[in-house]
Image (spheres, helix red, strand yellow):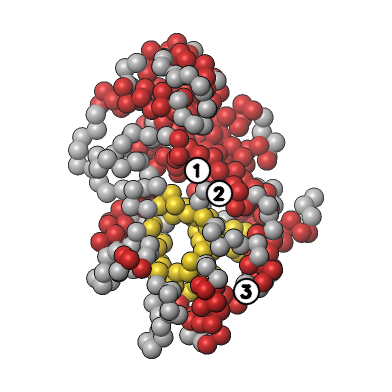
Amino acid sequence: MASNDSLLFPLVNMDAVANMQNAWVALCLRVQAADGDTGAALHSLFGEPDLLAAIAPLNCILMLASPAVLDAALLARMPVARVSFAFEAGALQDDDGRKRVAALHESGYRILVDGALAPGVSAPVGVTAVACDFTDSEPQSRVLPLVFGPHLAHGVDSAARHAQCARVGYEWFSGAYALHPAPNPAPHDGSSRKRLMTLLGLLARDAETRELEALLKQDPALSYHLLKLANSAAFAHSTAITSFGQAISVLGRRQLQRWLQLLLYARQQADGLPNPLLPIAALRAAHLEALCKLNGGGRDEQDLAFMTGVFSLLDLLLGMPMAEIVGELNLPPNAANALLARSGQLGELLAMTEARQVSAAMLEHAALTPRQWLGSQLHAYHWAIQVSRNL
């Protein structure tokens, strides 16, 4: 049975923040205090020794209603170089809130004012960066001074909204916009998609290395990314890897399959930017694997969970209905049901990794504690950050 301390541990919502080049630069953190005590929840969260280490080198932006919950003991656990604060604009309406924000700024913390200030209210001197929630509204036409940024647009859930925010000066973005891209008028390369589907099928059935090697030779882009990966600092080899056989040997059979699954997302987009789906696929895969392990799943089940997480974005990557993809890949029933209907244990766990906010009831149904959930999140973000830096 879970301890009372574990059950009172806060739920933490994490959202990746990307820059204009689709590179992750920070994580937004929001805490849900089990008993309504946000200060105690933050003490529990920042008392976890792995928190900032797991998300390094990214910093965190702590989204708070007010600075009043930040006492000296808590701030001692929040390094100035790693933690920023986004306070709701209403926190600056009284003198105490303004003084607290000004003191944090003078201590070296980066501060963002989240939302519009009330008429007649101004931010303390030097507090110039802004944040805004665009879940239900579009940005005003006023252009933000870039020198005072970077400014954060959160709740950005479409490519169109992302473009609107970028036009008025927002440089950092969080939200589901990568999952709702702009329509692509260009026809998909049929031969390339056929190769990808063939490779996916080989990966799904744990095909022989020679079959993978033969197909990789037909795809210069994928081959390039595989050799680049094998030669990256992540594997620290003294001699260059120059052949597929060497790359396969270096990575190992299990890791090869995992990296190849993710390499499918590594292709450059038409605008030359990295595919924003890549770190999301890595995040889902690692998170689903960690949750499967917590539920007692063995190595093969964890591998299937990882693959299911990666494959959950294939409909967006390939521009195909998921039902068609699943039908062609002949996946195991539990993976197919998870991808098509989010049904079964694997499907329910996949739905949790996709959820914008996970509730205590959802965790209880999955037989997980909030502390276990945080651990699985940190494991997933750590892996996804590594992937985005090495591919």
Spot occupied by residue 223 in the image (x, y as percentages of width and height): 37, 22
Pick whichever of labels 1 and 3 is earlier in the sequence.
3
**Which amino acid type is shown beneath numbered disc 3?**
Val
Q: Secondary structure at mark 1?
A: helix
Where 332 falls versus 8 (above or below)? Answer: above
Crowding at dot 2, Cα within 10 Å, few <14 / some 14-19 / many 20+, comes out as: many
- Determine the CA span between mark 3 and mark 2: 23 Å
Between 364 and 134, the residue placed more toward the observer is 134
Disc ID at residue 148: none
Residue tagged 2? 55
State if disc 3 and disc 1 touch (CB < 8 Å): no
Between 331 and 234, the residue placed more toward the observer is 234
Crowding at dot 3, Cα within 10 Å, few <14 / some 14-19 / many 20+, comes out as: some
Pick whichever of labels 2 and 1 is earlier in the sequence.
2
The reply to whether residue 31 is in sight is: yes
Residue tagged 1? 385
The image quadrant of residue 145 is bottom left
Between 331 and 266, the residue placed more toward the observer is 266
The image quadrant of residue 7 is bottom right
State if disc 1 and disc 2 touch (CB < 8 Å): yes
- Determine the CA span between mark 2 and mark 1: 7 Å
**Which amino acid type is shown beneath numbered disc 1?**
Ile
- Residue at 51% over, 23% down: 237
Q: Secondary structure at mark 2?
A: helix
Residue tagged 3? 69
**Which amino acid type is shown beneath numbered disc 2?**
Ile
Q: Secondary structure at mark 3?
A: helix
